[in-house]
């Protein structure tokens, strides 16, 4: 859950430009300063790639949100939440991830940039077979896997269908259902060696074995096509479970058809999405979804979405493995021109060390010069004659020096222990040892050397604390505080109302004579349970009665009789009827809208908490500095 939370809040493309200006305090909370530069970094990042321009904030507007955020962090720190082992380990994990681009030196040339732009303009439809390799596999084990996948390729060349081979051999779990088919993808979607092979294998042919960090792959290319770019749509969805019965599926289809008719009659798409869509994540935004490329979403959804020609166009109901959808095109974004795409391409190359194998070596050589690396070649030569397995005593000498720190036998022994190395000569691990020590030194200096890295680490630090304290003070509390939630509901019950509804029964009879008997019994004043007991005797079900209250578009039979909807499929009006009355809007009970009222209660608790924190901690803003920040 934390990973999803942070991927949504703190997704960032890391730039490697150091900020030259000295830090100036824009904001002070409880004695803790936030510089103008740090605020600007966060403000500009979080006001980019938004769903809509309406979500964009001015610096002054964003500062109020930022102050609320920082107040919660200060409170969490004062509660010592940043000292727990779980917090320390989680932050260390994030640091390792975001430090990776800083700990290599990937070079690239114009030809490489142009080739990647060529790939960005295409999409490849491919399938693959994967044989996994353990990261600690020996050379013999690696060769065994290579021999096996080479043999599989020979079988396919000899006539074995690729999809059959994928089901039989592939160790990608999805192969059992998709037969290895990956759909369409473009540049930067797959790891670099896989991408290279896919874009360089002719249509209809099968690649040679391809080695990636996952293992060995065979790739079959089915097709290439121009990249359609990215699309942003909204949708209204009715879920259909994997094991749904035909009746449940038909009910969902009727519901989506009713909604589609309302749209044709002029109903507002966003309003219907909010009230009717069962994809609740997008429903709260009027059905709006994040941008996607054609190959990054199921074909059953992607094809009709990309078939919409103009912004504002709406599809007929479409079926996917997840249910039924109506799709509205919001806007399209084609592949950008080369000069526009250059920055993105260069950034992606820098973040992917596999794009250039020599990146780490170049990086280490550069650091050796920066940190005045020197080595004792005579002592280094002695290591070739000393065995790790024999636990041979090491000479008490300095092997090398980095940044005025000496590294000798003690440090080498510690490295071998950490890596759990049991065999070989000490000389065989020397280069890896040097690389590890000089990389560790650079890693320790990242916050000092790169302000934007420091800002990002601060953001992760604060974000973890925000999540933890919000979970404790707001999210979990609101769900568990039954008395407080009940009191909040009583004060705010009119906030969530049912619309006009039909309240009564849907009665389905075996034949017309059963219907006549049922109507007579209802007319005589019997209730639904009494009618069922009177007609369904001797264990035979001659009549079924569904009781409830339905808004428009919630049930096809009610729609037909009450809301003048179209006749449902496979429907017999002679044996199915309704009894009841329309009722006016009324408040939903707490049980009927518990999720909504818990969300509202969380908002209320947070509002009260912010007021308390603003009274508790002193906040000081340098308004002159704030006015100097340009909006985005």
Image (tube, rainbow, N blue to C red):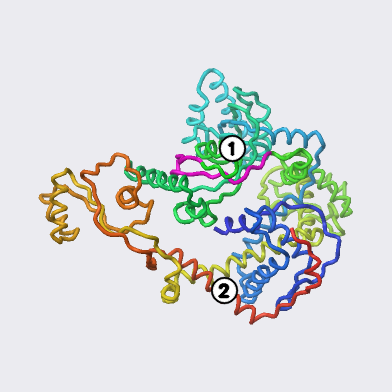
Q: Is residue 327 magenta?
A: yes
Indicate left or right for 282 with 259 as reference: right
Residue 180: x, y in percent? 53, 33
Q: Is residue 619 in sight in this rendering? A: yes
Mark number displayed over residue 309: 1
Q: Is residue 387 magenta?
A: no
Q: Residue at x 66, y 66 (%)?
A: 462
Q: Earlier in the sequence, mark 2 or mark 1?
A: 1
Indicate left or right for 537 with 227 as reference: left
Q: Quadrant of the N terminus?
A: bottom right
Q: Is residue 386 in sight in this rendering? A: no
The residue segment tinted magenta is 315-334
Q: Quadrant of the C terminus?
A: bottom right
The answer to whether residue 2 is above or below residue 181 is below
Mark number displayed over residue 607: 2
Indicate left or right for 319 with 357 as reference: left
């Amino acid at each position: 859950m934390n990973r999803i939370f942070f991927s949504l809040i703190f997704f960032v493309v890391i730039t490697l430009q150091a900020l030259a200006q000295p830090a100036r305090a824009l904001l002070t909370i409880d004695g803790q300063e936030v510089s103008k530069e740090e605020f600007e970094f966060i403000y500009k990042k979080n006001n980019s790639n938004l769903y809509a321009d309406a979500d964009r904030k001015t610096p002054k507007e964003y500062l109020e949100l930022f102050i609320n955020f920082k107040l919660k962090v200060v409170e969490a720190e004062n509660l010592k939440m940043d000292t727990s082992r779980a917090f320390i380990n989680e932050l260390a994990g994030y640091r390792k991830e975001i430090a990776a681009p800083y700990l290599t030196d990937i070079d690239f040339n114009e030809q490489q940039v142009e080739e990647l732009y060529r790939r960005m303009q295409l999409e490849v439809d491919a399938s693959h077979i994967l044989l996994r390799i353990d990261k600690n596999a020996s050379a013999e084990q690696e060769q065994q896997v290579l021999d096996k996948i080479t043999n599989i390729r020979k079988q396919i060349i000899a006539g074995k269908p690729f999809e059959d081979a994928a089901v039989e051999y592939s160790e990608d779990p999805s192969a059992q259902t998709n037969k290895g088919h990956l759909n369409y993808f473009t540049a930067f979607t797959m790891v670099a060696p896989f991408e290279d092979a896919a874009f360089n294998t002719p249509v209809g042919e099968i690649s040679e074995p391809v080695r990636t960090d996952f293992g060995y792959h065979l790739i079959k290319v089915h097709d290439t096509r121009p990249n359609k770019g990215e699309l942003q749509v909204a949708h209204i969805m009715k879920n259909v479970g994997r094991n749904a019965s035909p009746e449940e599926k038909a009910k969902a289809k009727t519901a989506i058809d009713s909604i589609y008719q309302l749209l044709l009659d002029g109903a507002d798409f966003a309003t219907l999405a909010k009230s009717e869509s069962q994809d609740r994540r997008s429903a709260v935004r009027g059905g709006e979804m994040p941008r996607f490329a054609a190959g990054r979403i199921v074909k059953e959804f992607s094809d009709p979405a990309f078939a919409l020609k103009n912004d504002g166009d709406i599809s007929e109901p479409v079926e996917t493995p997840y249910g039924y959808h109506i799709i509205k095109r919001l806007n399209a974004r084609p592949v950008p021109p080369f000069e526009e795409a250059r920055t993105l391409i260069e950034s992606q190359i820098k973040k992917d060390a596999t794009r250039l194998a020599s990146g780490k070596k170049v990086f280490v050589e550069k650091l050796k010069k920066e940190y005045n690396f020197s080595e004792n070649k005579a002592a280094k030569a002695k290591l070739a004659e000393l065995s790790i397995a024999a636990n041979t005593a090491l000479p008490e000498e300095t092997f090398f020096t980095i940044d005025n720190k000496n590294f000798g036998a003690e440090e080498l022994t510690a490295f071998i222990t950490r890596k759990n190395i049991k065999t070989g000569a000490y000389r065989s691990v020397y280069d890896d040892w040097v690389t590890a020590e000089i990389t560790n030194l650079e890693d320790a200096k990242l916050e000092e050397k790169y302000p934007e890295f420091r800002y990002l680490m601060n953001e992760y630090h604060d974000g973890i604390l925000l999540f933890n304290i919000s979970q404790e003070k707001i999210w979990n509390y609101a769900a568990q505080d039954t008395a407080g939630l009940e009191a909040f509901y009583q004060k705010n019950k009119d906030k969530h109302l049912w619309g006009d509804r039909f309240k009564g029964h849907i009665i389905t009879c075996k034949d017309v004579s059963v219907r006549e008997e049922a109507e007579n019994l209802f007319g005589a004043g019997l209730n639904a349970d009494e009618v069922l007991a009177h007609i369904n005797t001797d264990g035979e079900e001659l009549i079924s009665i569904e009781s409830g209250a339905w808004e428009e578009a919630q049930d096809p039979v009610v729609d037909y009789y009450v809301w003048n909807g179209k006749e449902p499929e496979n429907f017999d009006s002679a044996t199915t009827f309704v009894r009841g009355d329309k009722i006016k809007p009324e408040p939903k009970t707490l049980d009927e809208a518990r999720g909504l009222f818990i969300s509202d209660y969380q908002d209320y608790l947070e509002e009260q908490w912010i007021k308390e924190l603003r009274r508790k901690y002193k906040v000081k803003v340098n308004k002159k500095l704030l006015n100097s920040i340009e909006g985005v």
